[in-house]
């Protein structure tokens, strides 16, 4: 059953990427990252990874999270991870989704007014809320934009607790 769910999720990510291709291929960028999310440092906190993206034009941001493995193996279907899309300057959360063992996808549309207001700068935050489980996953995001040289390979890893 797990293989079937993974196949279905992969198909959903492919359809999501194809549907996002409403602009010319040159106008769409993709972020594809292999993740290792360690257990949360304490209850009501999370271990989070941050990925910055910059949009050049209004359009659709599509985000997918495919779970490759959970260690130790998890029993049940509870929510384990969350993915949020935020404006980079004000840290306003635009979209939030919780995912269980099967992962999932979401999309968010940006119009010209919002693009101007946010300067096209967004942050994708992937968080592990489990106190006991490490998660291996793949994050895929497709959006209308550009990745500047300062963002190339940039990953900010900050535990949810204060330093």
Image: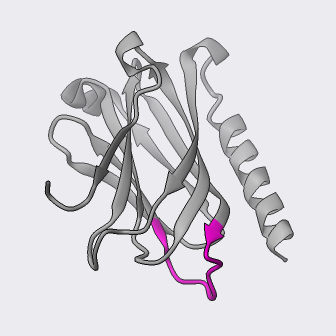
Q: Determine the main secondary structure of the stretch shown in magenta.
A: loop
120 up-or-down from 34: above or below: above
Q: Residue at x 41, y 26 (%)?
A: 58
Which image quadrant: the C terminus? bottom left
The residue lying toward the viewer, choosing from 123 and 80, is 80
Q: Is residue 51 above or below residue 80?
A: above
Left or right placement of residue 31 versus residue 95 in this view:
right
Residue 129 position, x and y percent, is 39, 71
**Apparent side of residue 143 relative to residue 118 in the rendered image (left or right):** right
Q: Quadrant of the N terminus?
A: bottom right
Number of dots carrying numbers: 0
Nearer the observer, 33 or 122 = 33
Rendered residue at 51%/30% (across/down):
143
Residue drawn at x 26%, y 77% as measured from the top left: 44
Q: Residue 53: horizontal and vertical position, in percent?
A: 40, 29
Image position, residue 49 (x, y; %): 39, 48
Which of 24 and 38 lies nearest the eye of the viewer?
38
Where are the magenta residues, as a range? 70-81
In the image, 7: left or right of 117? right
Specify whether residue 99 is painted magenta.
no
- Tell me which corner region of the image, top left, top right, bottom left or bottom right, holds residue 31: top right
The outermost residue toward the bottom is 76
| Magenta segment includes 76 | yes
Residue 8 x/y as whole percent: 79, 61
Is residue 25 positioned above or below 33 on the image? above
Q: Nearer the viewer, residue 72 or 65?
A: 72
Residue at the spot 60% in from the left edge and 21% down from the top edge: 23
């Amino acid at each position: 059953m797990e293989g079937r769910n993974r196949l279905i999720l992969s198909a959903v990510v492919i359809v999501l990427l194809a549907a996002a291709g409403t602009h010319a291929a040159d106008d769409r960028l993709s972020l594809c990252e292999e993740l290792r999310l360690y257990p949360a440092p304490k209850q009501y906190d999370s271990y989070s990874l941050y990925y910055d993206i910059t949009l050049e034009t209004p359009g659709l941001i599509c985000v997918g999270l495919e779970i490759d493995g959970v260690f130790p193996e998890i029993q049940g279907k509870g929510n384990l991870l969350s993915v949020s899309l935020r404006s980079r300057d004000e840290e306003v959360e635009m979209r939030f989704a919780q995912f269980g063992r099967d992962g999932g996808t979401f999309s968010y549309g940006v119009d010209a007014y919002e693009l101007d207001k946010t300067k096209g700068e967004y942050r994708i935050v992937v968080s592990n809320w489990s106190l006991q489980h490490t998660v291996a996953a793949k994050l895929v995001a497709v959006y209308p934009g550009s990745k500047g040289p300062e963002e190339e390979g940039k990953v900010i890893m900050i535990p949810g607790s204060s330093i």
